[in-house]
Image (tube, grey):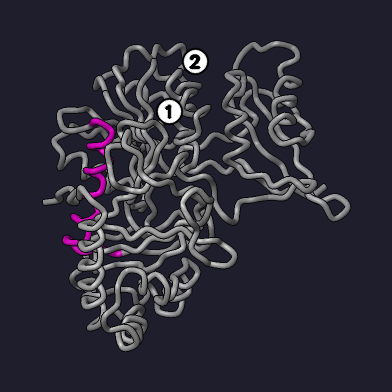
Amino acid sequence: MPTMPPLYSDRESLQQAQLAGLRRLLEALLPGNAFYGPRVQQFLLDYPDFDLDTFRRFFPFTTKRELVADQQNHPPYGRNLSEPLGHYTRYCQTSGTTGSPMRRLDTPQSWDWLLGHWLTVFDAAGVRGGERIFFAFGFGPFLGFWTAFEAAQAGGNLCIPGGALNSLGRLQAMAANRATVLCCTPTYALRLGEVARQNDFDLRTIPLKAVIVAGEPGGAIPATRRAIANVWQGARVVDHYGMTEIGPAGYENPHVAGLMHFIESDYLVEVIDPVTCAPVPTGQRGELVLTTLGGAAAPVLRYRTGDLVLPTAPEPAWQTIYTGFPGGILGRADDMVVVRGVNMYPAAVEAVMRRFEAVAEYRVLLSEQDAMTEMHLQVEAAGEVAANWTTVLADALKAEFALRIPIERVPAGTLPRFELKAKRWQRVAR
């Protein structure tokens, strides 16, 4: 049975537990993990009495590219397996939105370790049993779907799958079952509100208390959070962070909206400069690096997530010793686009767009002109809007980025809608 990871009241106790967990993990990888075994062996030869700082300084990073290449060279599952293949009972894979899909296998023990993290996510969201949770996505091979569903079930909640239903069907199922919690992406939470308007569906028939979102940065963007809460009659919006490679690792502070923590009892957290790889101090943006301290059947060590965060020292109001990350995931290190000399991140554009209820959906088109990247927006309106609404939107974007961005209004239904991670940024030929 899955259990929540332990909590610690002081950093010293936490770090002692992290070091003990790391040593157990490295010992577990030596016998059978052909991917990490040689690295671990060399590290232990060089630093037999290592501490956490030594590990952070001298153990090599792991990248997704390495793991994917290993699976391609050693198909189908690669060499990052610490137990005989017959011990593994669960299969998942990444979506492939940032490259080739990567496969993951889990044993019953490592799977329960992952479920325990989702119990932490639910607990921080106020979901502690007796809720009716609707999972508004198709259950493909993505780890996040299955771990969330099974952890909610283990936590004593009624779990309602929404696979194979269209958006209106999901709304009807939520109303019929009196759903109190919704799990989906931020984009899809807004999409369901749009479908409700189009079909005269009264969202007040769904007694929703919380919307738990993941998969996109929008869950921690204040404007997007407000938009979701407005759609869902003031339901609490809760952000979460996870990846197939690492499992469910981040949860939102129950006392401070938009403040992310990572489950540091089970993950060693680092933040580095994405270019120099040097450690980044608190208060400075950098790339998140995670080491799984459990789940030895399918671990990752010093894994470069590619996600940008802003580490912040704990404050009394947070009621935790864990490092805080205001705004959660701020974007991806490889998502930045330089438009006429201005650094543009998708999350920053999202933050402006979601200030406007008139925006039903949008798309960012990037093109090259005279060796420079140009950007313009396509926008759908949510129903009847003021005649000058695109001008107001353009002014807001210019005020934010000191950049005039052309806006094209397109007919309703022109732009794609997304159930999973939204893909709004596209490069086009001029």
Of badges 2 and 1, nearer the viewer stands 2
Q: Give the quadrant of residue 413.
A: top right
Assess whether residue 272 is covered by the magenta stretch. no
- Residue nearer the viewer, 342 or 147: 342
- Residue nearer the viewer, 126 or 164: 126
Assess whether residue 113 is covered by the magenta stretch. yes
Q: Residues within 10 Å of mark 2 (few under 14, many from 20)?
A: some
Label 2 sits on a secondary structure element that is helix
Residue 253 x/y as whole percent: 33, 37
Instruction: Say if mark 2 contacts mark 1, CB within 8 Å.
Output: no
Query: Magenta part of the protein: which range?
Result: 105-126
Name the kind of residue labelled 1 in the image: Ser
Residue depicted at x 53% and y 67%: 277
Which residue has dot 1 on it?
167
Residue depicted at x 54% and y 34%: 417
- The answer to whether 175 is drawn above or below residue 362 in the figure is above
Q: Give the quadrant of residue 114.
A: bottom left
Which residue has dot 2 on it?
197
- The answer to whether 260 is drawn above or below residue 58 in the figure is above
Residue 118 located left or right of residue 140: left
Q: Earlier in the sequence, mark 2 or mark 1?
A: 1
Estimate the spatial distance between the alpha carbons at disc 2 and disc 1, rounded to whole Å: 12 Å
- Residue nearer the viewer, 174 or 341: 341
Q: Main secondary structure of the magenta part?
A: helix
- Residue nearer the viewer, 342 or 176: 342
Label 1 sits on a secondary structure element that is helix
Name the kind of residue labelled 2 in the image: Arg
